[in-house]
Amino acid sequence: MRVLTVIPARIGSSRLPEKPLRSIAGEPLVSLVAQRAVNLGVSTRIVVAADDARVLEAVTHLAVDRVLTEPHHKSGTERIAEVLQRPEYAGIQCVLNLQVDQPFLPRDAAEGALRMVESGFAIGTAAAPLDPVHQSDRNIVKVAVGKADQAERFARILTAIEMASGGDEFLHHLGVYAYTREAVLQWVGLPECVAEHTERLEQLRPMANGMSIGVASIDCVAPLAIDTECDLQRAQCSQIHIKDQSRKSA
């Protein structure tokens, strides 16, 4: 299966301004994510799709394609749909969406999302065990998975009943999607739903319109996603610690 990994990068993030260009250990986040995509080794081709030329300039040293997309897109999926309509990607049938806030995504998550598509889902994603301390953190997206690995509900905030039960049925959703070409184009053609705006979760649109999402459950601690200034500081500290440990062992 030919897989195109697309890293959609929007410069105007509200929670972390100019997110793709913010640096960890001196390297722009978009560059770290693109390098992670290369290291995952699951793609035939990798594209950074951004609405700002500065983001594309940050990955010129890597063996990835660069596409300057329209600035009006409301979601990463819409940006990916624009990429797929370019003639050079006409033969691509499966897409992996690696979000720009996921520089530490485990290979199991990417492979799991792709496996969901291979098993028959139009859309696949991945999730890890939910740490109880994150149950009330709205920056952590939760997913409840039902029979046959199908997503039943995505949420940022759990209800009082779900919290009282310990949120045992929920997993920590990871920022990776796989989909068929047809699923991407169908998704962006669907009408927007109220829930996607309320929760700020674009995956609620296909679910509201009858598209099923398969969830690969991986057995590991959820990697740090870079959504806020606090996340960025935590990542900086962890990378400094890793470099210090490397120097001591050298």
Image (cartoon, grey):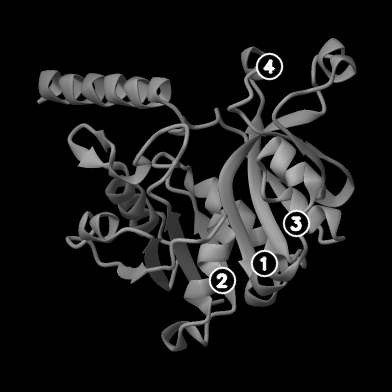
Secondary structure of the residue carrying numbered label 2: helix
In the rendered view, would you say 234 is above or below 142? Answer: above
Q: Position of residue 186 (x, y in %)?
A: 72, 72
Please identify, in this view, whether the residue under mark 1 or under mark 3 is nearer the observer: 3
- Per the image, the residue denoted by label 3 is 192
Please identify, in this view, whether the residue under mark 2 or under mark 3 is nearer the observer: 3
The amino acid type, in three-letter code, at marker 4 is Ser
User: What is the CA distance from the residue labelled 2 to the residue labelled 3?
Assistant: 16 Å
Dot label at residue 136: 4
- Per the image, the residue denoted by label 1 is 188
Secondary structure of the residue carrying numbered label 4: loop
Q: What residue is rendered at 35% in x and 68% in y?
A: 68
Q: Position of residue 120 (x, y in %)?
A: 77, 68
Choose top left, top right, bottom left or bottom right for residue 159. top right
Choose top left, top right, bottom left or bottom right for residue 71. bottom left
Looking at the image, is mark 1 or mark 2 earlier in the sequence?
Answer: 2
Q: What residue is rendered at 41% in x and 39% in y?
A: 104
